[in-house]
Every structure is written in C-alpha cells, then in structure tokens.
Amino acid sequence: MSELSLTLEEPRGDEGRVAKAAPVRPQSSVSVATGLVGAAAVSLMVLLLATLDLSLEAKIFACFAAAALPMMLWSILVEKVHLRPSTGLAAVRQRDYAASLRNAGTKLLGLAVTFGLIAVFYWSFRFYASGDQAMYFGFLQEALPYLFLIALPYLFAVDLYMVEPEDGLWHMGRAVMGRWGEVDGAKLRDHFRAWTIKAFFLAFLAPIVAGSVANATGLFTNHPFDTVVSTVIWLVQVMFFYDVIFGTIGYILTFRPLDSHIRSANPHLAAWVAALSCYPPFILMGTGGPLDYRMNTQEWMVWFQGHDAVLLAWGSGLVLLTAVYAWATVIFGMRFSNLTHRGILTNGPYRFFKHPAYVSKNLFWWGVHMPFIAVTTSLDAWQNVLLILVTNLVYYLRAKTEERHLRADPVYRQYEAWIAQNGIVAPITGPLDRALSRLFGLGPRQV
C-alpha cells in the first residue's frame, strides 16, 4: 500500500493539556475507482454476451478479460501502483542482469516444483475427480506451457527492481537445489501457505464461475423478470456473479507490479480451521452436514407466496444484502483472497463495517432459509436456530482470526481504532465482541 501519514491531531484542553487524539481512517490500499472500472466493463460485456451465441468457455474468458484488463490498466496508468513502496520494487535497477538471470532461474525452478506439488495435491484428493472441475483442469493443461513461456522473462524483469529479491519462490528453488543453508524457513512456509490458498480456492470457484456466467449472460433467454420471485432470484445470482468473477481474479493476479501480491498468508491454525470448515470438502454447514440448519424448512418465497407486497419487500432486502456482499468483494479490485494480507481496505463497505461480507452473508442465510420456522415441529425450528447460530459463530471466529493476522500491520491497527469509534454497528456490537474475544482468546495482542 502507499505510504501513509499516521500523524494524528493533538487538540489541547482548556488547561493546556494534550487531549487524546481521535483515530484517523487510513488511506485504503485499493481505490473505489479500481473496482468500479472493472465492474462497469464486465457489466457491458455481459450485455454484449447475452446477444451472442458463444461457447461457455469463451464467455467465461471474455468476462474475466473485461473485468481484469481495465483494472490493470487503471492501476498502472492512472494510479501508478507499480511505483508504491509496498510493491517491494525500486525505481531504478537494483542488480546486474547476470545476477537477476540467476535469481530468475532459481525462482522458475521453485515455480515448477510448486506447480508439481499442486498437481499432486489435486490428484491425491478424490474430491477433485468428481468432474465439477473438469473445465478448470482442462484450462490449466492448456495454459501451463504458455505460463512457463512467459514466466522466466517476467521473473527476470521483476527481479531486476526488487529491493529484496529472495522471495518465497527463490527460497523454494534453493530448497529444491539442496541449498538448505540459504533457505529462510519462515519465508518457505509462507510460500507454501500462499500457494495452497490459491490452489484450493481456485478449484473451489471454477465450477461456480461457470454457472454464474451462464446465468448472467442468459438475460434475454431465461426470462428472469416474469415474477417477483424470479426477479429477486436472478438479481441475487447476478450479485454472486460479480463476487465470483472478482474473487477468482484476485486469486490469479498476485503480481508485484500491480501491488496485488500476497504480503503474507495467515499463519494461525485456528484461522485455517475456521475458514476451511466453510468450503467443500470440509464444509460443516452444507446440506446434510453437522451444522445443516435447513432441516424441515422452506425458503422465504414459500412462506410468503400469495402476498406480493411481502415478497417484494422481503426479496428486496435479500437483494440488498447480496449487493453488500458483492460490493465487499468488488472493492478489493484485483486483491481479494481468503487467509491473506494484500493491503488494508478502509473504503467502500469497509468504511462502515470491519467484515461486511460476513455480516451480509449470515443475515442473508437467516432471510432465505428462515430457520426459525419448520414444517414439522417447533423443536426442529429451535434446533435449526441453534445450528445457524453456531454457523454464525464460525464466521465470527473467521473474522477474529483474520484480524489477528492483519493486526501485525500498523495500518490495520489504525483502521481498527478508527472503525471502533466510527463503524455503524460498533456501539451495539462492541461489548459483545469484546466478551467473545476474551472467551476465545482472540483479542488484540502485543505486536
């Protein structure tokens, strides 16, 4: 992120004593404009694709290109993010060409072995043999030769300007070469964590992207506006389209010249347990899972059928919640990814909440599934309420373990102090948050 001025005003009281300075909201690492140009471009692309008879693969590629390329160009040409100190790149060349070529070769070796380990990971888990990721794996097979073709010149060019060239890929390469005396164990572990995150979540998102693109580009064939319910469902799906497109771009575009590289991956085991329990194959709250809160329930449109005014009001609330959820991803621009630190966001919905995506997602589940009403007995309803409350608690633990990771950054600590006084729900949730943080040992620590 760009250098920030952390100077706080020091107003003086009537007796000349220095009063406690009010926290200042730090500048966000990503501008609002970055996400907006990507969202606008991909929206226009969806309208165009809705009129064209193209394969689903072509539509997916077009959507990614439409969202990513404008954001990349905006970031480099307008905001000049490649000049930020947070990229780790200097304005002038840091070493001679021969040294950078050697470093690039080491990093290319590290990259090749990393991809090999990811392939073993995918092969080892039968979950990935289900066929849902067939398009994703097919794309990888076609793209990998081109990736390695451009990898060496890219690594060489970046290494020339890196202030600290011995990054995770370099340490991975040295480890493969048996140069263990030169390997920094902490950087190597962080490298493994970062690439595990990319591999896991890209495979998770791939089949969702396909469905989302098909739905969004079917605007003129699916007749989504026939009823209130169909309109709400289509709008919700469109919001999820923006979420998965920008989320997937975030996992792909982790490049220093874009200032979108991974600064660090969350090192806390509790964070990984909480996060992975929300995604297949480890998901706890999925259908039939131990935290399935949908047993013997009906969704909102069933309970309100025949009452168009209520359907419209309730459905509008669900669309609003989903819009906040999508906004919380789009505002990241090219930097979204779970379990990572890639710069601190303080604008968009993060201007009002620390965790807008988690808040909106959990409220959405309450509104869609209405677990407090069961078609059988009130006992089932109470059980469902208990299970969704535990699900909410899982997401609370995700939020707190993310905060523990980000708190190592002084900019996040400044943002945390500011949002505690200026956040919309801070006065209401603050006491409960402090109590739960003490209960689970997740409060602020000395850093």
Image: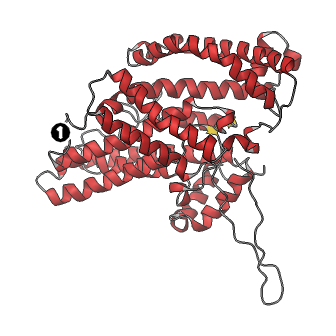
What residue is drawn where x is 83% and y is 83%?
17
Q: Measuring from the top left, give residue 283's x and y in whole percent.
A: 45, 31
Mark 1: amino acid: His
Considering only vertical position in the picture, is 365 above or below 115?
Answer: below
Q: Measuring from the top left, give residue 366's x and y in whole percent.
A: 34, 50
Residue 287 visible to the viewer: no
Side of 339 relative to 98 (left or right) = left
Viewer-proximal residue, 285 or 82?
82
Viewer-proximal residue, 214 or 291?
214
Viewer-proximal residue, 120 or 108?
108
Q: Measuring from the top left, give residue 265's x and y in whole percent.
A: 66, 34
What residue is drawn where x is 59% and y is 16%?
147
Residue 103 visible to the viewer: yes
Side of 404 relative to 370 (left or right) = right
Q: Measuring from the top left, give residue 119's x and y in whole percent.
A: 56, 12
Where residue 158 sits, quadrant-wise, is top right
Tell me the crowding category of disc 1: few under 14, some 14 to 19, or many 20 or more residues within 10 angstroms, Cα based: few
Considering only vertical position in the picture, is 443 above or below 75?
Answer: below
Side of 196 relative to 133 (left or right) = right
Q: Residue furthest front?
A: 77
What residue is drawn where x is 47% and y is 35%?
278
Considering only vertical position in the picture, is 52 above or below 328?
Answer: above
Q: Secondary structure at mark 1?
A: loop
Q: Circle 1 sits on which residue? A: 223
Viewer-proximal residue, 347 or 46?
46
Considering only vertical position in the picture, is 307 above or below 245?
Answer: below
What residue is drawn where x is 57% and y is 37%?
72
Q: Residue furthest left?
A: 306
